[in-house]
Image (cartoon, rainbow, N blue to C red):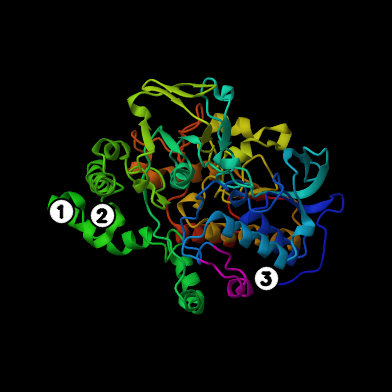
Amino acid sequence: MSSTQLLPESTLDRAADVDVVVIGAGFSGLYMLHKLRELGFSARVLEAGDGLGGTWYWNRYPGARVDVQSIEYSYSFSEEIQEEWEWSELFSPQREIEAYINWVADKLDLRRNISLSTRVASASYDESASTWTVSTDTGEHIVSQFNIAATGCLSAPLEPDIPGLHSFAGTTLYTNRFPKEGFDFSGLRAGVIGTGSSGVQSIPVIAQQASSLVVFQRSAAYSRPSNTRPFEPGEYEGMKLDYDSIREAERKSPAGVVLSGALAVVAAGATRDILETPVAERMAAIDEYGWLAPLAWTDLQTDEQANAAAVEIYAELVRRVVHDPGVAASLVPRYPMGCKRMIVDVDYFETYNQPHVRLVDLRQGGIVAITPTGVETAQGSFDLDVLVLATGFDAMTGALRRIDFRGRDGASLADYWDEEGPVSYLGLGVAGFPNLFTVTGPGSPSVLSNMVVSIEQHVEWIADCLVHMRSTGYSSIEAEVEPSLEWVEHVRSLAEGTVRVADSCSSWYLGANVPGKKRIYMPYSGGLPAYRAKCDEVVAAGYEGFKLK
């Protein structure tokens, strides 16, 4: 039976309150709800925030922006939604993406099945009944046959471990929960700790307002200009006419992107080894590719010496923008390019040419403590009125570990992953936790791809699985241990020999930004077509690697 065929309302297990509980109301949770209702399953979505959007609800810091072109970072399952919504520029800001998500929710009448301001505290599996009981911070206990965690890959913020953090007498702001009404930095002495994506994107905007800005850089980031701009008259309409071919190309693309620059250029233009190219010709690539020149080499990911040569191209690009040679040198990372996802920015490097902006490179002397008046470092003290913390996330597994999931025999998901690392089958299921699905979990392409394309594939696979179970009378499905361990090893092997797992790379892909977290490479790097083919093979073989009963 096709998963697109509308089915009558039918509860799988009449002892349950609903067929499915979905945790999270971002892109994945909303599409999952729509798909479930379309197929006749009863469902409830539980969302910790008081608004929809997931990542795009919480991360409303100044300058927050998507790094995939707007027209691609959007749902493809509805031609009507594609045709009716209007994006305003190439790379949309947070407020526009949040508005889009809310517009979709209203258009599909999704709100009636969503409980906002409802944080899931725990979820326990009852093997005798094949049901989950989800308990919330509001005191509610909801029984469902299936539990789908649409909790996001970057939704568990890290609290920085800095002495005196809460002693600061000024205003402390977090990029991952910035005030909805915004914040006016005008006339204030501002400081930002952290130069990951949220720091890089917010720093230029804060600098426009603040009387002074001190950036405390723990580790330099690879970033490039997004070159975003409003659409020219008729440009967006022309793109819409080509939507079918864009979507088809996305599904064939390893990263699920066609129009978004860097990956497309690399795929099409990387035909030479950098180590076999004279230095003058390497630098000449800047004239051809601009900020994408460091990426346009076949040996970039697999040879650390080649990677270092590409980093020198990147350093030259930074030097051409940043006037102060010392500041320019500090803004060049000391880890391999490609170790972490490259950021897109608007005037990030140009910001350091402004006289009221100072970069404090903590590699030259770290933070000693936060004080009531500001930040004390080994390089001196800095008095501030407002401190912005852009200190990252416990990525891919953090949101799942923060919910007390209890599977068969009361086994704890957090304990399991603490001991073994994030063992998962396809990023969809975890052994010992029947009827629990994870959307874009560890072991899936997720953060190495256009997230919306990955989300849609996962949601549709899960929906098809539930239809299969309903039509065949199965009550539970569970990932098996050996296939899960083999999949973790396969994911690791794909990254082996690349800079992503080099000793010099300490990225959140590996969990290396979280003290004590087991170092395992989490995202699947074989590309979306290969991953989709594997998921289809599993289904064709009777859900091979899963135990159905």
Q: Is residue 250 left or right of residue 151?
A: left
The segment highlighted magenta reads 74-88
Q: Quadrant of residue 457?
A: bottom right
Helix or strand or loop: what does disc 2 sit on?
loop
Specify the amino acid type for callout 2: Trp
Q: Is residue 83 magenta?
A: yes
Q: Which mark, residue 277?
A: 1
Circle 1: is it few (<14), some (14-19), or many (20+) Cα within 10 Å?
A: few
Specify the amino acid type for callout 1: Thr
The answer to the question of whether label 2 and label 1 lie on touching residues, with beta carbons closer than 8 A, is yes
Residue 6 drawn above or below residue 196: below
Of marks 2 and 1, which one's residue comes earlier in the chain?
1
**For the point 50% across and 39% down, which residue is it?**
187
For mark 3, what is the residue? 4
Helix or strand or loop: what does disc 3 sit on?
loop
Residue 449 lies, in percent from the top left, at 47, 55
Q: CA distance from mark 2 to mark 1?
A: 10 Å
**For the point 58% across and 32% down, which residue is it?**
171
Helix or strand or loop: what does disc 1 sit on?
loop
Specify the amino acid type for callout 3: Thr
Residue 232 drawn above or below residue 487: below
Is label 2 or label 3 in front? 2
- Main SS, magenta residues: loop
For mark 2, what is the residue? 297
Q: CA distance from mark 3 to mark 1?
A: 52 Å
Residue 485 lies, in percent from the top left, at 52, 41
**For the point 87% across and 53% down, which residue is it?**
14
Q: Quadrant of residue 411?
A: top right
